[in-house]
Amino acid sequence: DAKTTQPNSMESNEEEPVHLPCNHSTISGTDYIHWYRQLPSQGPEYVIHGLTSNVNNRMASLAIAEDRKSSTLILHRATLRDAAVYYCILRSRDYGGSQGNLIFGKGTKLSVKP
Amino acid sequence: SAVISQKPSRDICQRGTSLTIQCQVDSQVTMMFWYRQQPGQSLTLIATANQGSEATYESGFVIDKFPISRPNLTFSTLTVSNMSPEDSSIYLCSVRRGPSETQYFGPGTRLLVL
């Protein structure tokens, strides 16, 4: 499985933007970049995903490097509720069967200070 | 999105006993997934359950220890058999839904084995 590397932890101030980096130098051409987050005492929740182009949704933005070997999850204005563990996961474009399984790494624990 | 409920939400069990965890989804899905999250760790996939066929187990997990049932397209159970303190974990049910096969997670079952 292609692996990702993320910082163990990051800190942010409330109301400020947060840039969460992810390295995935062994990404294949058929891998999507997915981000999930896990709030305290909850199951993980989907944040965003992309293949080559930058993506935006109501939760966050995803900036993907031109060579696709790294990406950055951007939270435009961090709130206290955004304190969570953020997982960057590579997922095969072939969603059928085990190739589409999500393999979780350790993720980045984001702390948000008021 | 998907609404997933799990029962029980938490339990304290004695070693050597077994616990069955239930997962209910708000609408039909083809595949259901069971994950384990040990204390302070990330999520690990235990098995994939398809309706009408045997579950597919990941390396390190066996059917005798974690039997799974999938009687219909909205329900699954995971049994943790002959428990030991090392089985103390959060067990999460998950499904895929939508054109991108986004994965959704239940709230988890927190198990403590004494």
Image (cartoon, coloured by chain):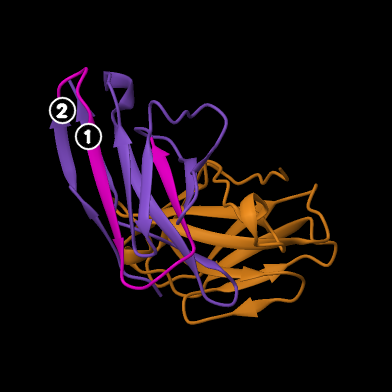
Chain colours: A orange, B purple
Question: Is residue A111 among what the camera can see?
Answer: no
> The N terminus of chain B is located in which quarter?
bottom left
Is residue B12 positioned above or below B28 on the image? above
- Mostly what secondary structure, the magenta segment? strand
Graded by Cα atoms within 10 Å as few (under 14), some (14 to 19) or many (20 or more), the crowding at tag 1 reads some
Amino acid of disc 1 = Leu
Looking at the picture, tell me which residue is in the foreground, A23 or B29. B29
If you read the primary sequence from the N terminus, does the residue marked by circle 1 or circle 2 appear first?
Answer: 2
Can you give x and y, in whole percent of width and height, for residue B16 in the image? 22, 17
Q: Chain of mark 1?
A: B
> The C terminus of chain B is located in which quarter?
top left
Q: Are marks 1 and 2 in contact (CB under 8 Å)?
A: yes
Looking at the picture, tell me which residue is in the foreground, A1 or A61. A1
- Looking at the image, which residue is at 69% across and 43% down? A3
Q: State the residue position of label 1.
A: B19
- Give the Cα separation between the discs numbered 1 and 2: 8 Å
Is residue B11 positioned above or below A4 on the image? above
- Looking at the image, which residue is at 52% across and 26% down? B60
Looking at the picture, tell me which residue is in the foreground, B88 or A88. B88
Q: Is residue B31 magenta?
A: yes
Q: What range is drawn magenta here? A: B13-37
Graded by Cα atoms within 10 Å as few (under 14), some (14 to 19) or many (20 or more), the crowding at tag 2 reads some
Amino acid of disc 2 = Cys
Is residue B48 positioned above or below B104 on the image? above
Does B33 sit left or right of A71 as displayed? left
Q: State the residue position of label 2.
A: B13
